[in-house]
Amino acid sequence: MKKFLLSLLFILILAYSAEAQQISESAEKRVALITRVMAAELGLNESEYIRLKAFNRERIVKGDQISEFYANNPEMKTKKLLELEANFDKKFKTMLNPTQLAAYAAYKHDPTSDLALEEKAKTATNNQK
């Protein structure tokens, strides 16, 4: 039974790593940047950092997909991105302690805090040139 569970865990890890490798290099850089900044601002420990990185990866990949899919419909794109952010906030806040929640609230109100979108905009601008 232990061998079966270990084998299953190994297969899941391989599948997850293969999925993680399928995102673009630009998206992975944004994931790393936003995760590092948020972890420093909120004082996250290593396990929280790992969970945050997974949340950010999901958020950035889905955000890029929404931006591409709704490129011709800015209203729907904005609506879907706001839904994505609300879902991210809900999941992320469940892992924070009260001190971290207060720091996150301050971080969210800082207009320069959304580095993920800022980096995406810079990349798009540079690609258009």
Image: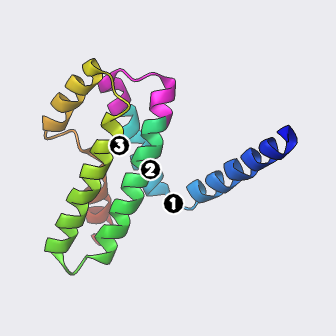
Q: Is residue 117 visible?
A: no
Relative side of 74 to 61, left or right = left
Q: Is residue 116 left or right of residue 61?
A: left
The residue located at (64%, 51%) in the rendering is: 17
Q: Quadrant of the C terminus?
A: bottom left
Pinpoint residue 44: horizontal percent, then vertical percent.
40, 23
- Residue 70: image location, x then y, percent: 26, 76
Give the amino acid type for the residue marked by disc 1 in the picture: Ile
Residue 57 has which mark? 2
Q: Please state which of residues 41 and 88 is positioned toward the viewer in this rendering.
A: 88
Which numbered dot is residue 91? 3
At label 2, which amino acid type do we have?
Arg
* Mark 2 element type: helix
Alpha carbon distance from label 3 to label 1: 22 Å
- Residue 106 vs 60, above or below: the answer is above
The residue at 43%/56% (across/down) is 26
Q: Distance from label 3 to label 2 (Cα)?
A: 13 Å
Instruction: Report the magenta residues as a range.
Output: 38-50
SS assignment for the magenta stretch, majority: helix
In what quadrant of the picture does the N terminus appear?
Answer: top right
Q: At x 35% / y 20%, what residue is drawn?
A: 43
Seen at 45% across and 40% down, the residue is 53
Q: Residues within 10 Å of mark 3 (few under 14, many from 20)?
A: few
Label 3 or label 1, whichever comes before in sequence order: 1
Q: Using the numbered discs, state the Cα–Cα distance from disc 1 to disc 2 in whole angstroms.
A: 9 Å
Provide the secondary structure element on which disc 3 rests.
helix
- Residue at label 1? 23
Residue at the far front: name it. 1
In the image, 55: left or right of 74?
A: right
